[in-house]
Image (cartoon, rainbow, N blue to C red):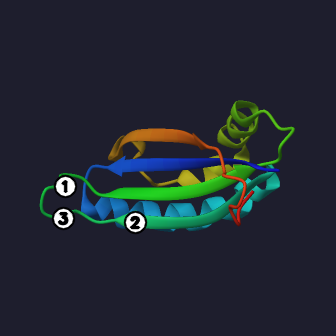
Amino acid sequence: MSQYQLRVYTLRSPEALVAYESIWAKHIPGLAKHRITTHGVWTVPVAPGREAPQLYALVSYQDADDVQERMEAYLSSPEFRADMEGFDISQIVIVAESALTSIADSPLR
């Protein structure tokens, strides 16, 4: 069984969201090299009552893997540095991570 994680990135502006979408497209192969599977990436634009746009990513790790160790390995990799080149990291306001536990009948387990 895999370990799932929902990652939520809150960005400073709609322009930052568009830029970060293209960054995430680059992240997918690099994450895979570090045994992190991307299942989907979604955006939530600014809307009435919402001050900042967000990007959601659903990823998984192999059951025996240490999630923090895998993510730290990716974040220190040349792939990550290349993906982020030219992007102002201060455009990411906050990153929230939630470990997800699937129910017995979940299609993703």
Residue at mark 1 to residue at mark 2: CA–CA distance: 13 Å
Q: At 78% from the left edge and 33% from the top edge, which residue is drawn?
A: 66
Query: Mark 2: which amino acid?
Result: Thr
The image position of residue 99, as x and y in percent, is: 60, 40
Q: Is residue 43 above or below residue 53?
A: below
Residue closer to the observer: 19 or 65: 65
In the rendered structure, are the residues bearing label 2 and label 3 in contact, judged by CB atoms less than 8 Å apart?
A: no
What type is the residue that disc 3 sits on? Ala
Residue 85 pos. (x, y %): 53, 53
Tell me the distance, in whole angstroms, between the alpha carbons under discs 3 and 1.
5 Å
Secondary structure beneath label 1: loop
Q: Earlier in the sequence, mark 1 or mark 2?
A: 2
The quarter holding residue 46 reads bottom left
Which residue position is annotated with label 2? 43
Name which residue lies at 81% across and 51% down. 35
**Horizontal side, residue 71 vs residue 2: left or right:** left
Please give left or right for residue 53 compared with residue 96 in the image: left
Query: Marks 1 and 3: in contact by CB < 8 Å?
Result: yes
Disc 1 + disc 2, Cβ < 8 Å: no
For the residue pair 1 and 11, the one nearer the viewer reads as 1
Q: Residue furthest right?
A: 64
Could you classify mark 2 by the number of other residues whose Cα lies within 10 Å: few (under 14), some (14-19), or many (20 or more)? some
- Residue 47, labelled with which disc? 3
Give, as a three-letter code, the residue at label 1.
Answer: Arg
Q: Secondary structure at mark 3?
A: loop
Q: Residues within 10 Å of mark 3 (few under 14, many from 20)?
A: few
Q: Residue at x 42, y 58 (%)?
A: 55
Q: What numbered label is drawn on residue 50?
A: 1
